Image (cartoon, rainbow, N blue to C red):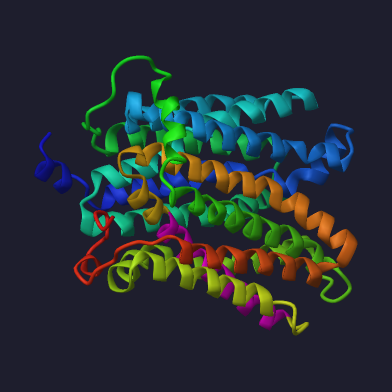
Amino acid sequence: MNRPALESSLNPFVTLILFWCSLIVVSAVYVTLPLISLFAEVFHVSSSQATWAGSAFSFAFAGGGLLFGALSDRFGRKKMMMTGLLLLTLTTLLIGTVHAFSWLIALRCLQGLAASMFPPSVLAYAMEMFPTNRRVTMIGFISTAFLMASIVGQIYSSFIVLTFDWSYVFYILFGAYLLSSLMIAFGIPSDKTDRPQGSIFAPLARIGMLFQKKRLPLCYIISAILFTALVGYFTTLGSYLTSSLFNLSHEDILWVRAAGIIGMLISPFDGKLVAKYGVKSVLWSGLILAAIGLGLLGVWENLAFLIIMSVIFTTGVAIALPALISLIGQLAGEVRAIAVSFHMFMLFIGASLGPMLSIYLVDIGGHLFTFEILVGLLCISAIVPLFIPLRESSGTKGQEPAHSV
């Protein structure tokens, strides 16, 4: 398929498919968060043990993304997305049938590995298959899906267990993943870029090349901090809103969290911001906006004000994340796929550390102290772009700056 024909086949339906599949896959990271107390009761384990239903997935998801992102260089983006979705479909069905906690944890690990094949592959697919004037916008849609999954996954599982047994959370997801597999198989064009030959493990050797690019590792500091702050915020928010200051029910808290989706809707428009102001400026602005929203969140004990600051915080994250991915793609050049995979690895390492850090900080200093520490981390990350020299001439600000390095 030649390039003009390929680009013409990337219609809005393809964008919808990639958005939907990104949302539904990454939602699996978060679906067990509202089920922790239920798992503790059903499987007769402690709450700390029950949290491994989420942690086991997260660690496998982070490590697997690094591995499979490299292998997508060898086998192709669409094939890797298809394989991941099919394995995710099977493991999700099996999780709904388990009666032993050990099997739940083992299958959540396998589910995390299967799910990890999708995000780095879909991001590399967007970078390679979309024309330059649509690339950052497409990455914005995918990033929006990743961010919305942190809320949608929790709302979905909470809603299901109000009416059905917890196993139906996974049975319904099984159907959604099966449908998504068909959508990827028949709804998007195949990527036809040249693939390296030789050993299937050869792409893994390219990981070392990331650290030969002096500016690229700095981006990964931002990657880790961004999701440490995001997931740490969600973790702290839950206990903050159930405290005597607000005394909200768990159902009410979910709707407060859902308000954050409003801020996330800006992500698809990040391409226009990058085209006008440059990728570094947009990244820096997003980080500062997120820090402002989170920093002001606890200054007034008013629920409406808290929701507004929450929306400002998630807006900042939604602005920063697509710009960060675009910057990594520019700096990485020929190792773009593994660079984005390492970005995903660092994101979900941050997502795994966020709850642990937040719980520890709440125990020693309280909720407001925790929010301010997370703000401090965001401020540190906002300094990092200043140490990444990047040419962004006026010519590159008129289009997606894929070739500005």
Q: Whole-percent x and y of residue 94?
A: 62, 24
Q: Residue at x 59, y 41 (%)?
A: 28
Residue 306 is one of the magenta-drawn residues = yes
Q: What residue sits 69% from the left and 77% below the top?
A: 297
Query: Residue at position x 30%, y 63% from top?
Result: 391
- From the top left corner, tell me how far across and down residue 19 is, in percent: 40, 50
Residue 261 visible: no
Q: Position of residue 346 (x, y in %)?
A: 56, 45
The quadrant holding residue 181 is top left
Q: Which quadrant: the C terminus?
A: bottom left
- Indicate left or right for 312 with 56 as reference: left
Say if the magenta span includes residue 120: no
Q: Position of residue 178 (x, y in %)?
A: 45, 32
Return the residue nearer the eye: 237 or 399: 399
Please tell me in which quadrant of the rendered image residue 380 appears. Answer: bottom right
- The residue located at (32%, 58%) in the rendering is 136
Residue 268 seen in this snapshot: yes
**Relative horizontal placement of residue 364, taking residue 281 as reference (left or right):** right
Residue 165's place in the image compared with 288, above or below, is above
138 or 163, which is in the foreground?
138
Which image quadrant: the N terminus? top left
The residue stretch that appears in magenta:
303-324
Q: Left or right? Give the position of 232 relative to 367.
A: left
